[in-house]
Amino acid sequence: MKQWEKNIRKVVPYVPGEQPNKKDMIKLNTNENPYPPAPGVERVLREFNADMLRLYPDPTVSLLVEELAGSYGLNHDQVFVGVGSDDVLAMAFLTFFNAGKRLLFPDITYSFYPVWCDLYRIPYETQPLDDNFRIIKEDYYKENGGIVIANPNAPTSIYEELSVVEDIIRHNQDSIVIIDEAYVDFGGSSAVQLIPKYENLLVVQTFSKSRSMAGMRIGYGMGNPVLVKALNDVKYSFNSYTMNQTAILAGVEAVRDARYFGDCRNKIIKTRERAEDALRELGFTFLQSGANFLFAAHESIPAKEIFEALRNNNIYVRYFNLPRINNFLRITIGTDEEMDRLFAFLRQFTEKYSKNEKF
């Protein structure tokens, strides 16, 4: 190995879900929203003046910050915007977790957390979920350099009640607590309402799931002004112009159309409930979901075999070959038509499997 190679920072990268592009495929593996963004988003893109691209975007992202602040009943200095929630979280890890003490998060959760820890040299310690994949809040009472909780959790889909979240925050007021709420719009109450009570709380959300804009990359964090200023100081030191003109304008329109947002979210929840009934009839069990996906296991067929059979027939779900969860499939909620095709395939597959017939 050459000397300069020894000085290269080496990390094990996050592995995103597969992004196939095949005709007539059913893509239920990356928790994307199956419905288009709000109509105003399309209008903005259609009417966008290309001449604007020669100008730098507003580094403060003031239009979108103001719209988000008004939507959540916050002041503009309580909102930070980034290029997807991954960008917001990465900036938060870089900004806040510098105490040299261990960052705490669950052993089964969003797999980007340990990647950022390795990248930024942050020590961490995972806390085991219980046998039902729920957080044991007492595990977070110990000394730490920060806490990150995904709620609802991924990939388990479980939503912890706000009382559990608040208990963890209340016991850790000397460190920053991040609540990662990528899926909260499908499951329960947001911790945003706790921001006035706890100055050490940062709540992170995204446009990728409930607002149907995964391809636009918009995420945001909400907390007290001191936290937001610290995030912006780091962002401006890293890259002042992180969000492009089209994303800012499209994001504003997505936030403004509250009715479309609610209707789209409710359609997904309704389809999720129907999917639970259908999968239960096919011999699946699953955790109670607060997200736009189900975390399901079959009573007799290994998850990997189902995953491979689905994939061979252009139906994509997510499989994690990891301890404790290697017999589960994460199934994104698609349209009713997509889910019906999934159920039809699974019905045929499980029947043939039970008869030891090849599919």
Image: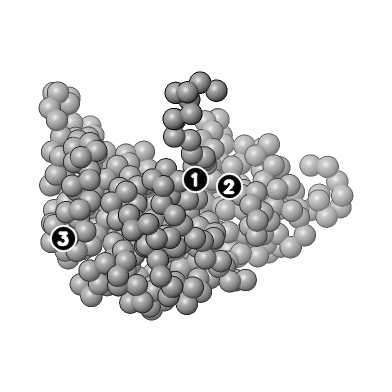
Residue 262 pos. (x, y %): 32, 60
- State the residue position of label 2: 318
Q: Residues within 10 Å of mark 2 (few under 14, many from 20)?
A: many
- Tell me the residue at 62%/37% (across/down): 314
Position of residue 36 in the picture relative to residue 194 (left or right): right
Residue 31 pos. (x, y %): 47, 49
Q: Secondary structure at mark 1?
A: loop
**Residue sitting at the far front:** 3
Mark 2 or 3, closer to the camera:
3
Q: What mark, if any, has residue 225 been given in the picture?
A: 3
Q: Quadrant of residue 142?
A: bottom left
Q: Residues within 10 Å of mark 3 (few under 14, many from 20)?
A: some
Residue 38 appears in the figure: no
- State the residue position of label 1: 30
The quadrant of the picture occupied by the N terminus is top right
Three-letter amino acid code at the position of disc 2: Arg
User: What whole-number distance in Å separates the C-alpha atoms at marks 1 and 3?
Assistant: 33 Å
